[in-house]
Image (cartoon, rainbow, N blue to C red):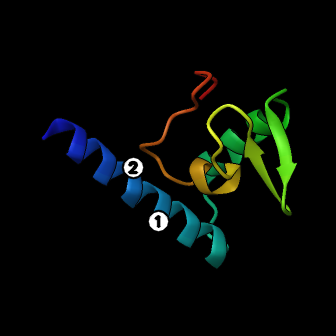
Amino acid sequence: MLLKMKLFTKLINIVVGNWRNLTGYTSDEQKRRLDICNKCEHKMKYMGSYICDQCGCILKSKASVDSEKCLMNKW
């Protein structure tokens, strides 16, 4: 049951992050996180977006969700 809840939460975070990315949402926390990501060696460009080569997430989307964490513990 706990695994199902974690997967559901992750799915919701992906949807929220992508929605915010598509609608142009920005916050001070997202900007702070993206500043860190922009200096990271794991940032890579893929199909027009920047992603993390460790977790595969779209950086702008993941950084916009407060409950998300960097896999490399950078934020």
Q: Which residue lies under the disc numbered 1?
A: 15
Q: Where's residue 49, x and y in %? A: 80, 59
Viewer-nearest residue: 44 or 39 = 44
Q: Which mark is residue 42?
A: none
Q: Specify the quadrant of the image occupied by residue 36.
A: top right
The residue positioned 79% from the left and 30% from the top of the image is: 42
Q: Judge whether 8 appears above or below 40 on screen.
A: below
Q: CA distance from mark 2 to mark 1?
A: 9 Å
Q: Specify the quadrant of the image occupied by residue 53.
A: top right
The residue positioned 84% from the left and 61% from the top of the image is: 47
In the rendered image, the residue lying farthest to the top is 73
Q: Where's residue 30, x and y in %? A: 63, 50
**What amino acid is found at the position of numbered circle 2 in the picture?**
Lys
**What amino acid is found at the position of numbered circle 1 in the picture?**
Val
Q: Where's residue 33, x and y in %? A: 66, 40
Marks counted in the figure total 2
Q: Judge whether 73 appears above or below 19 on screen.
A: above
Q: Where's residue 75, x and y in %? A: 59, 29
**Mark 1 crowdedness (10 Å alpha carbons): few <14, some 14-19, many ≥20:** some
Q: Which mark is residue 10?
A: 2
Q: Quadrant of the N terminus?
A: top left
Helix, strand or loop under label 2: helix
The residue positioned 67% from the left and 52% from the top of the image is: 58
Q: N-terminal of the two: label 2 or label 1?
A: 2
Q: Specify the quadrant of the image occupied by residue 70.
A: top right
Viewer-nearest residue: 24 or 41 = 41
